Amino acid sequence: MSKVVATGSQSRWRAHWLWIALPVAVFAVAVAWIITVNPLQGLSNGAPPVEKLTFERTVLNTSGLHLLVRAGGSEPMKIAQVQVDGAYWQFTQDPPGEIARASTAWINLPFPWILGETHKVDVVTNTGLTFGHEIAVAVPTPTVTAGQLKLQGLVGVIVGMLPVAIGLMFYPALRGVGRSGMNFLLALTIGLLAFLLVDAIEESFDLVGAAAAIFQGPVMVVLASLASFMVLMAIGRRRGTPTGLALATYIALGIGLHNLGEGLAIGAAFAAGSASLGTFLVLGFTLHNITEGIGIAAPILKERPPLWAFVGLTLLAGGPAVLGMWLGSLAYAPQWSALALAIGAGAILQVIVEVGAYLMRSSKKGLDALFTSPVMGGLAAGVAFMYATAALVKV
């Protein structure tokens, strides 16, 4: 009897995999036929293929001008000529030949760029289509050196870790607040996170406007935000609703992901030659982020976490700014910055939901807790402070 049952199970298993393999095989044959025969070729009216070219990175050094471009459109494209400031220049391409759809290539020109000047680059394809790119301020692109990385790391610490640490230093003083004070601080956290959420989404959509169309920028931002929110909600709720140190950790994570995007912006400002703008951004971001430490401390005011917990929260919230500085100045691309900000937006939304739920539970008033004077005041104070200090970084 057991042999008969085993034989029947094997037959069902084989049939199961057969009905998976069969449609996959048919699909593979159909794809191969379409590529080989190209049945749509007869519908062509002779017009050239749609071409798109996105400039993702510009490098200026002693050997000249180097541009990283990404091809879009319906067919591979070939670069025929390159103009700089109206004059044609000899160039090399790496890798050479046609650039496949969604692929990248470096265009290298021995162009004697002038420090501080503006240069206009025009790339002409073999179909005659021209794509323009402007270098607003020509400055040497930072190179990967130990000294450069140390300096950028220092700036990242000042922008990310220092303000969070300063905010967490208010922890002993905040422990003495009563229930109304606690509700005010929790609402303050929601207010500053709500501002960061709107800011992250807005900046994400701005960045994807400069990215290649192949990345489907707006869709990528929405999907990444939703995925980040759902994943973190699932992780956070697997052991019940997060409270105390766990909730503070999620707040630090959401802020950290947002600080990664801020670090990318500062690093990109330095790489683009906006040294004074970068310095101004550093000062603005430092003041802008001080409240974040207070927001992280709010859920743990009833606890006495060990010292290492405060160090860990500071690193989690501020450390990504250092990584963002390095990536932004050395390997900046708008789509990756937008993706980082979108993921951060989803994480921030998850934290807003959890802090709001914690506030309603701790007040034992349910939804009515959100409409009390301390809560409304905290929300307004959080948004107002972030809005006022954001004026220093919105240039």
Image (spheres, rainbow, N blue to C red):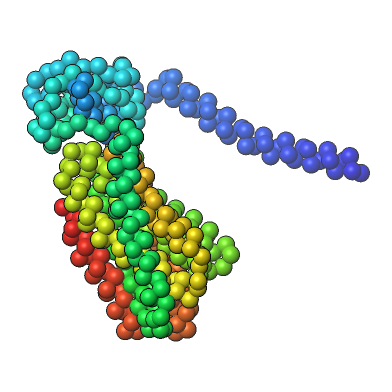
Where, by quadrant of the figure, is residue 290 drawn?
Answer: bottom left
The residue at 26%/52% (across/down) is 203
The residue at 34%/34% (across/down) is 146
The mark total stands at: 0
Residue 42 visible at all: no
- Of residue 157 and residue 118, the one placed in the foreground of this image is 157
Q: Looking at the image, is 360 positioned above or below residue 161?
A: below
Residue 207 location (% of width, % of height): 26, 46
Where, by quadrant of the figure, is residue 215 drawn?
Answer: top left
The residue at 62%/37% (across/down) is 20
- Of residue 36 and residue 242, the one placed in the foreground of this image is 242
Residue pushed farthest right?
A: 1
The residue at 18%/18% (across/down) is 110
Residue 23 location (% of width, % of height): 58, 34
Residue 215 visible at all: yes
Q: Looking at the image, is 381 positioned above or below residue 7?
A: below
Going by the image, does 13 lie left or right of 390?
Answer: right
Quadrant containing the N terminus in the rendered view: top right
Q: Looking at the image, is 223 positioned above or below residue 117?
A: below
Residue 318 location (% of width, % of height): 37, 54
Going by the image, does 214 lie left or right of 18?
Answer: left
Residue 66 location (% of width, % of height): 23, 25
- Of residue 3 and residue 168, the one placed in the foreground of this image is 168
Going by the image, does 245 lie left or right of 340?
Answer: right
- Of residue 348 and residue 13, the one placed in the foreground of this image is 348
